[in-house]
Image (cartoon, grey):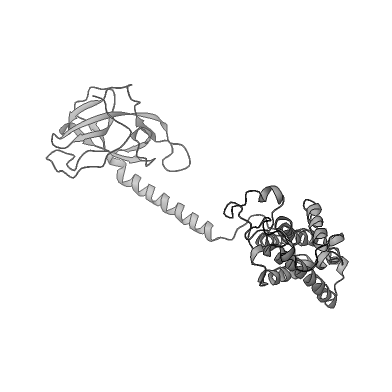
Amino acid sequence: PEYDRSVMQAAPTRTSDVDSKKGMYNKVVTVVNNKEPYDYYYVLHYIVDMDWCHLVPLHQVGTFQGTTIRNGRPRYKLVPEGQARELDVPASRCREVQALTISKTNNADREVWDVVLPEEYESYTKALAEERRLKRLAESTAAKAPSKGPEQPEKPPPAAWVHSGNKLLKKIMRHRNSWPFCEPVDHVALGIPDYPTIVKCPMDLSTVKSKLEADEYSKVDEWAADIRLTFENAILYNPIHDRIHMLAREMLQQFNEEVKREAKVLIQRGLVLDEVGWDRIMPQDGGAFGVPVNGAGTASSSNQGAVASTYATASTIAGSILGALDPGSRMSPVLR
């Protein structure tokens, strides 16, 4: 018959009057009156009602290697399927031997056994237990000992502008009109598939905050450019009469005013603006609604042309913007 040797089964609980009385699954045995050229067999199947065993021979495959007490002892594995005769014998012919499993796998073909003779079993198992105890003690001692690895260089202090930048960013994010700009735009959820084609470099204030905390800005210019880009994207994408467009203009103007106010604080602290780079992010005067379009306060290069065009259009509109616009022009939900 064909036997499945891939899974080792759990032992039964039946008791019989033979030597291996508690069931024979997964046991290593010798066979009385065995004429085959193998000393040890593995019980692959045990038929409880018949007290009958199906046995697979074990053969030695080299010896254990390493520095443990097991070094040099024979390693036993199952003979590969089809290369030796498997036996079906009554359990009364089987004598269990002490065999320690090494791999602790549920696949018998991959298991390795250390067969222990009766006369050495007690002393050998005690030696193994002591070896394991000493190993655990050494591991515990090593875990408690201070690390002797290479010393990590101290993290350099943040640039002089970082404290001011972090404070200013938090103030901007707490502003009552900053809510559309604090998280990335989800153009799928908002149903605006054209957003990625118009806004080439998406940015939002939470991303700026994360980058600032991760020390990803090497210069204050990069930090300020990302904040301005957040609002410039909203100005670029949303029509002039749209609420988000107007909020973006207001927040950009608010940011520029905060930059000016923080410059005064830095000067009062005795810092020189050009030494911390703050002079490079100071907004320039001019532009529609007081929002700069040239110089240090200009839009990012990817959006500059479109933003400048939007500013120019806005500057020609007089009176009520909402009343002058075509009510059928493109409107969008909360976008930036």
Identify the residue at image location x=46%, y=37%.
65
Say left or right for 109 vs 268. Answer: left
Q: Nearer the viewer, residue 156 or 99?
A: 156
Q: Position of residue 271 (x, y in %)?
A: 85, 72
Say left or right for 2 vs 102. Answer: left
Residue 125 at least partly seen: yes
Q: Report which quarter residue 261 is drawn in.
A: bottom right
Instruction: Locate the C terminus and report the quarter of the image it occupies.
Output: bottom right
Q: Position of residue 236 (x, y in %)?
A: 74, 56
Q: Position of residue 213 (x, y in %)?
A: 68, 63
Residue 291 at least partly seen: no
Query: Given the current orientation, which residue lies at the most extreme left position?
Result: 17
Q: Nearer the viewer, residue 319 or 294?
A: 319
- Is 265 situated above or below 183? below
Q: Report which quarter residue 215 is drawn in.
A: bottom right
- Is 215 situated above or below 258? above
Identify the residue at image location x=35%, y=44%.
124
Q: Report which quarter residue 169 is drawn in.
A: bottom right
